[in-house]
Image (spheres, rainbow, N blue to C red):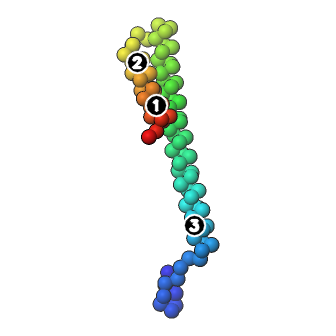
Amino acid sequence: MINGMGSMSRASPARRRRRGAIDQRSRGQQLADTLKSSIDEVSRLQQDATKAVDDLATGKSEDVTGVMSAVENRTCVQNAFCHPR
């Protein structure tokens, strides 16, 4: 911002620290939201795979390929989530 003298004024160190703390909390909240979303997705895939296996075992379904696909999807996502590089 330009003051009346024509020079640029700068934010005080305290203001920069407060702004940095707000930015840090915002980034922390974004990380928390991303992790929660990822955990929810892994949980949903686990439930889908469990239901598919149960349905196959009880005779409600004969779709072996669908069961294998559900289990494989869950395994891939879980491994990617649990073992990031």
Q: Which percent across, then down, holds residue 57? A: 49, 9
- Residue at (60%, 74%) from the top-left corner? 13
Q: How many marks?
A: 3
Q: Which percent across, then down, holds residue 19? A: 57, 66
Check whether the beta carbons of the residues at disc 3 and disc 1 lie within 8 A of each other.
no
Element carrying mark 1:
helix
How far is mark 3 from mark 1, CA to CA? 37 Å
Give the amino acid at mark 3.
Arg
* Left or right: where 42 falls relative to 63: right
Give the amino acid at mark 2.
Met
Element carrying mark 3:
helix
Foreground tag (3 vs 1) = 1
Check whether the beta carbons of the residues at disc 2 and disc 3 lie within 8 A of each other.
no
Residue placed most toward the observer, 44 or 17:
17
Q: Is residue 68 visible?
A: yes
Residue tagged 1: 79
Element carrying mark 2:
helix
How far is mark 2 from mark 1, CA to CA? 16 Å
Residue tagged 2: 68
Residue at the left extreme, as displayed: 65
Foreground tag (2 vs 1) = 1
- Upstream in sequence: badge 3 or badge 1: 3
- Residue at (53%, 36%) from the top-left corner? 39
